[in-house]
Image: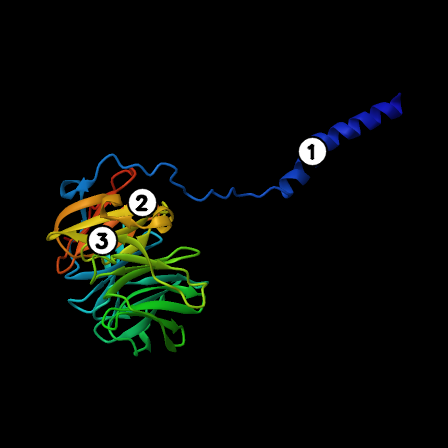
Amino acid sequence: MPGTTKTFIAIVLFLIVIYPIQTQENTPTETLEAPQSFPDTTIAEAFNQDDLSILVGNVQRPNGITWFNGDLYTACNGDWTLYQIDDTTGETQTFIFGVQDVHSLYMEETEEGFNIWAPDFATNQITLITQDRSNPDPVSDSIEGPWGITTFDEETFLVTSLKDNSIIQVNKSGESNPYLDGLRSPAGITRDDKFVYVANNGSARRAIEWFDPSEEEPELQSLVNGLQNTSNLVLAPDGLLYFTYALGTRGVVGRVDPEVCREDGCINEDVEIVLFTELPAPLAGLAFSDDMRLFVHAIYRPEIYWVSLYGTEDTSTEGANS
């Protein structure tokens, strides 16, 4: 019996003291959050000008805009400056000087932080801007009127040439090659994991087209037709394709499910209007935060507006310059 009692006590001590310690050592100390998803993307009705809040109004003529880790980055073609703007307070600071007329910005996350790749329409250059804010580095100057930019692979971009009605392949060393022609003043361009989408600013009939970049000779196919002056394209965190276009003289933001429209093509009646503004077309900038706040501005106007599509609480712009 004494031996049995000692054995029992040893087992109890192991279960109470030693086993929990071993278990804790094999248990992660942090719980990873699941990626944010938006199972319900319903919007009861389109937002209008009264629903918009001004984040900031101190960037003279904001043009291309993108969002990254709580900040907006926008290129001003009034003073050739790239600004960094806190997406909550509107606090604004100069990030770098030396970009002239940039309509699109591609944010590349790196081990050090990020790089920004900027097609400069005025100089025909693709410019690299690094996180350390060193002087902008023009890596290519061979594209006529570069407007939009997205990735082809890890080392190569697809850049729209609005003046040449084409898409150019440009690698990070600056080497460029013709990729796809026959477009109509192509502007915004974006992609998902399989397909590329491009806006034809110069054709309502061919407003938004798509192609498969894995094909040896990709063919343009209709995604949405019947839209006037389509410019920016953004695949938002909710998985839908958003774009800016004109209804008469007013700037509008619409959206479609690209998977649905790839099947047989969509027309303007299939487009869900998300935001109907009183701002003059074209809306020059469109960006989304990861919680689906939409940021937008008109060309030649200093105000950057925002609205939450899915009910994010109001952000405070106290202290923002206006």
Instruction: Specify the label residue 5 is tagged with.
Output: none
Q: Position of residue 21 (x, y in %)?
A: 66, 38
Q: Mark 1 — residue? A: 17
Instruction: Specify the label residue 292 is tagged with.
Output: 2
Which of marks 2 and 1 precedes in the sequence? 1
- Label 3 is placed on what type of residue? Thr
Question: Could you tell me if the residues under marks 3 and 2 are in contact, i.e. CB atoms within 8 Å?
Answer: no
The span from disc 3 to disc 2 (Cα, nearest Å) is: 16 Å
Q: Nearer the viewer, mark 3 or mark 2?
A: 3
Q: Position of residue 65 (x, y in %)?
A: 26, 58
The span from disc 1 to disc 2 (Cα, nearest Å) is: 47 Å
Is residue 210 placed above or below 181 in the rendered structure? Answer: above
Q: Dot 1 lies on which element?
A: helix
Q: Dot 3 lies on which element?
A: strand
Q: Nearer the viewer, mark 1 or mark 3?
A: 3
**Crowding near the residue tagged with mark 2, few <14, some 14–19, many ≥20 C-alpha atoms within 10 Å:** some
Q: Dot 2 lies on which element?
A: loop
The span from disc 1 to disc 3 (Cα, nearest Å) is: 63 Å
